[in-house]
Image (cartoon, helix red, strand yellow):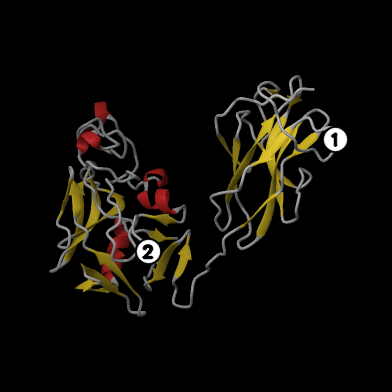
Amino acid sequence: MKALSVLMLVTAMIFSTGCKPENDPINGGGSQGGDNNSDNNEEVIVKVITDTPKDITETTVVCGGRVEVPEGLTLHELGVCWGTNPNPTVDGAHVSTTNWMVPFVCALRDFEPNTVYHVRAYALSDSEIYYGEDKSFKTLESNPGNSDGSGTYNGHDYIDLGLPSGTLWATCNVGANTPENYGDYFAWGETCPKTTYTWPTYKYCNGEDHKLTKYCNMASFGNEGYTDTFTVLCSEDDAATANWGDRWSMPTDAQWQELWNNTTTLWTTQNGVNGRLIRASNGNSIFLPAGGYYWIESLNRVGSDGNYWSSSLDATGPNNALYSKFYSGNHSSGPYDRSVGYSVRPVFH
């Protein structure tokens, strides 16, 4: 029988929920298939390819595969199976896709850190299960924290400053790889840096600060009277969460106030960069570089001011959000224009 490839090349993302497929089964058609493999059949009539696992963390991995189906054969299920032993099967842990587009991609979770796993793509017809090649991967080692309260999560470091709430602060800004690096700049509620910071380019408005489309508790500021009840950034709009992972977030205004009220600060130069050294009573510290801010296409006040967003909306005017500012003489907090590009220093929880 002449093997023909399925020609659907749209990627679908699924999660390890074990959902059964709801769409139409795959029917063979396309170009010549290759050699590979079924655990149960003598004649190889379906080719399953396991893609190399990627985006590996302590507990998650992304993997999937492709399938080439001979003409006239119907498949009823595609998915991946995994385990700690080679050549896992669907008798163990597995997940099936509910979307018949291929190549298919599965986002798997709840793995143990620092553990070797094996994964195989599979395809199921009425009477046979076809498997792809065994691919192995090792989850990252979990860092539970050191004796001084420091640790690492998703490749980013945090430190315990002995604060009453137990909040752990990152040692770098989002987009930075050292404490002195300024990192990226974000408009409030946006998760990617850009070249122009102003209301016409702002994500959550219709071109003006009185035409807001999200985070607006006053009809007079909303686009065509729009309002909602959000007063703190949702996770999908949090630059720290979006860029560093689910256990990172932008600090609230209350967390900024706690930081200032329970530490001592010193305007200083660290590795040639001006900023504020935040010292805690437990001996730990963080450095906040004075990265200035972006307005329109200009970077302003670099080396003179530090401007850092909180995740809190200004209750008195939703076109503003609350931020913390410092300079050589002092530090302060207050509301400012959401469309401006400020630095982000995450907290860990």
Give the image quarter of residue 38.
top right
Label 2: few (<14), some or many (≥20) within 10 Å? many
Asked if one can make out residue 115 in the rendered structure from this viewpoint, the answer is yes
Comparing labels 2 and 1, the label whose residue is closer to the camera: 1
Left or right side of 14 for 195: left
Identify the disc placed on residue 151.
Answer: none
Which of these two is toward me, 99 or 18? 99
Task: Looking at the image, tell me whether mark 2 or mark 1 is earlier in sequence order.
Answer: 1
Left or right side of 156 for 99: right
> Which residue is label 1 attached to?
41
Q: Amino acid at mark 1?
A: Asn
Q: Position of residue 263 (x, y in %)?
A: 28, 73
Q: Position of residue 45 (x, y in %)?
A: 78, 30
Q: Is residue 194 above or below residue 42?
A: below
- Tell me the quadrant of the picture where the N terminus can be found: top right
Q: Position of residue 73 (x, y in %)?
A: 76, 23
Residue with the most extreme right position: 42
> Which residue is label 2 attached to?
170
Name the residue: 26% across, 68% down. 260
Q: Position of residue 295 (x, y in %)?
A: 17, 46
Q: Amino acid at mark 2?
A: Ala
Report, in whole angstroms, how far the alpha carbon at label 2 lies from the one at label 1.
Answer: 54 Å
Asked if one can make out residue 166 in the rendered structure from this viewpoint, the answer is no
How many numbered tags mark residues here? 2
Left or right side of 38 for 244: left
Q: Is residue 66 above or below residue 73?
A: below
Name the residue: 75% across, 31% down. 46
Give the image quarter of residue 161.
bottom left
